[in-house]
Amino acid sequence: MKKKKSALITGVTGQDGAYLAKFLLDKGYAVFGTYRRLSTPNFWRLQYLDIFDRVKLIPADLVDSTSIVEALMISEPDEVYHLAAQSFVGASFEQPVGAGEITGLGVPRMLEAIRSINPRIRFYQASTSELYGNSNTGVQTEETPFRPASPYSAAKLYGYWITRIYREGYGMFACNGILFNHESPLRGLEFVTRKISNAVAKIALGIEKELRLGNMEAQRDWGYAPEYVESMWLMLQQDKPDDYVIATNETHSVAEFARRAFATAGLDWEKYTRVDERFLRPIDVNFLRGDYTKAKEKLGWRPKVTFERLVEIMVKEDLERWGRWQQGKTFPWDAPSYPTEAGILTRALRV
Ligand code: NAP
Ligand code: GDD
């Protein structure tokens, strides 16, 4: 009998890791995922998608090469999806060395381990539209120059190039997915879209009174995460390794997201939203919009869920969750144990 294809996902406990695990399980893969041994494990997304028992979990940390080697030896993968990173841009200004160590150096630790264990393993690197920074060129393609504007994106730039260097230097099948922002009800609460949808639900149900945001003029190309993970898989099924932009080619501001989200719950956003300078970054990326023509032509990938529908999906799901919570129901979910941001001290408070 033909052996099942096997995939190793680093960062399987994150938004993309969980959706990708589900996608690959549905395709018949044996799915292995690395997770960090925290004092309290973070498996809620896998439980939420009802796949916790089907993913084979391996403890590994990107700062520890031995654990990466171990994960590869245990899983013997055909494909590695390297998604683990310290992915919150705001936090990378607070912990720039950590960003370099984990998000940057984590990539050659993966690639070196693969090269020495089995260089035929196909490798996906989670690159990002943050690489463009404020390159101000309008619509961004695979050819647009990068100009990182945060410790996070500087680290990702290193990851992007080291992936290309292993592809060109060692002939490895290594691809960069340059993914623009993608969101879902499984998005972390630090990120602006989920922060908004969660706050809208709480305000609508009388649990919270206001929402405090930073730069509301920033514009992003927001897509729907479950669709984006398919593109990762498609990249690794091609005859040749390459880099691809994955985006919607549509841009909306944070203010627009907030206005729509409040409207979904029948509320006027201006009554509840305030600017709080704690959420401003030392430098911000003002505008992102991706041209996914290459992915459409070569991978047959295109986005389907619109911006309007994305906002609706996220707000409705958070409304439903908080409604169940008010009825005393319990289920795998992050928000009830998330601390109120008023208690979080950041460097911005000192400047
Ligand atoms: P996420 O939800 O923040 O997940 C990040 C994952 O990385 C989590 O599983 C986290 O584990 C793990 N991780 C963090 N530090 C680690 C370490 N030192 N060792 C091992 N694992 C570690 O991020 P995401 O939205 O799914 O994004 C997945 C990847 O795509 C990231 O590399 C991100 O930078 C990149 N990306 C995301 C987007 C987007 O819009 N979502 C766009 C472009 C690129 P814990 O659960 O233990 O924290
Ligand atoms: N998080 C957050 N919180 N962002 C805010 C807030 C706030 O209260 N107020 C305004 N913003 C603005 C940020 O300044 C930024 O311009 C924009 O909203 C989006 O912020 P995030 O949702 O934190 O995402 P990001 O664009 O910085 O980074 C995400 O997308 C990248 C791809 O472009 C992350 O997923 C990265 O890992 C990913 O690479």
Image: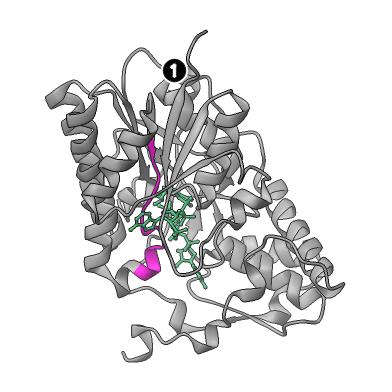
Q: Is residue 88 magenta?
A: yes
Q: Secondary structure at mark 1?
A: helix
Counting from the top left corner in percent of width and height, residue 313 is at: 73, 51
Q: Is residue 100 left or right of residue 282?
A: left
Q: Is residue 141 left or right of residue 309?
A: left
In the image, what residue occupies the spot 39% across and 69% down?
90
Q: Against 73, is 317 above or below?
A: below
Q: Is residue 332 left or right of residue 346?
A: right
What is the three-letter code of the residue carrying label 1?
Lys
- Can residue 248 be spotted in the picture? no
Q: Is residue 57 magenta?
A: no
Counting from the top left corner in percent of width and height, residue 343 is at: 51, 89
* Residue density around tag 1, few if under 14, some if 14–19, many if 20 or more, within 10 Å: few
Q: Mark 1 — residue?
A: 298
Q: Which residues are magenta?
A: 81-91
In the image, what residue occupies the spot 20% across and 43% down?
108
On the image, which quarter does residue 175 sit in?
top left
